[in-house]
Image (cartoon, rainbow, N blue to C red):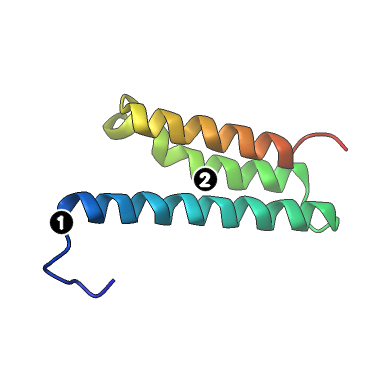
Amino acid sequence: MTGSPSLAGKDIIEAHEASDVSAINGIVSLANILKTRGLLTNAEAGAIYESMSLPLGLPKYAENPAVQELQLNLDRLFAVVVAPK
């Protein structure tokens, strides 16, 4: 981002949301590729999931419906990665 003063608060929030989704999808995709190639164990994938989930469960965020939705999405995505093949 360039820090343009013309960006409204709503635009910045939406950009952060898009960035978060993009990062999560990239991390989960990479984990899935590594797992498929035998380079990542279920335990390691679980550790990645835990490290991504931990901040979402902090009291500061836990009651936020948007954070809860993000956690649910993360749960679903990682369920595919750690599912028995």
Say which residue appears at 41% left-offset and 28% top-offset. Answer: 68
Is residue 79 positioned above or below 31 on the image?
above
Q: Nearer the viewer, mark 1 or mark 2?
A: 1
Q: Residues within 10 Å of mark 2 (few under 14, many from 20)?
A: few
Q: What type is the residue that disc 2 sits on? A: Ser
Numbered badge on residue 8: 1
From this viewpoint, which residue is outermost toward the right? 85
Say which residue appears at 32% left-offset and 56% top-offset. Answer: 15
Q: Position of residue 63 (x, y in %)?
A: 31, 24
- Nearer to the camera, 46 or 70: 70
Who comes first in sequence, dot 1 or dot 2?
Answer: 1
Say which residue appears at 24% left-offset and 56% top-offset. Answer: 12
Numbered badge on residue 51: 2
Query: Does any portion of residue 58 appear in the rendered image?
Result: no
Q: Secondary structure at mark 2?
A: helix
Query: Does any portion of residue 6 appear in the rendered image?
Result: yes
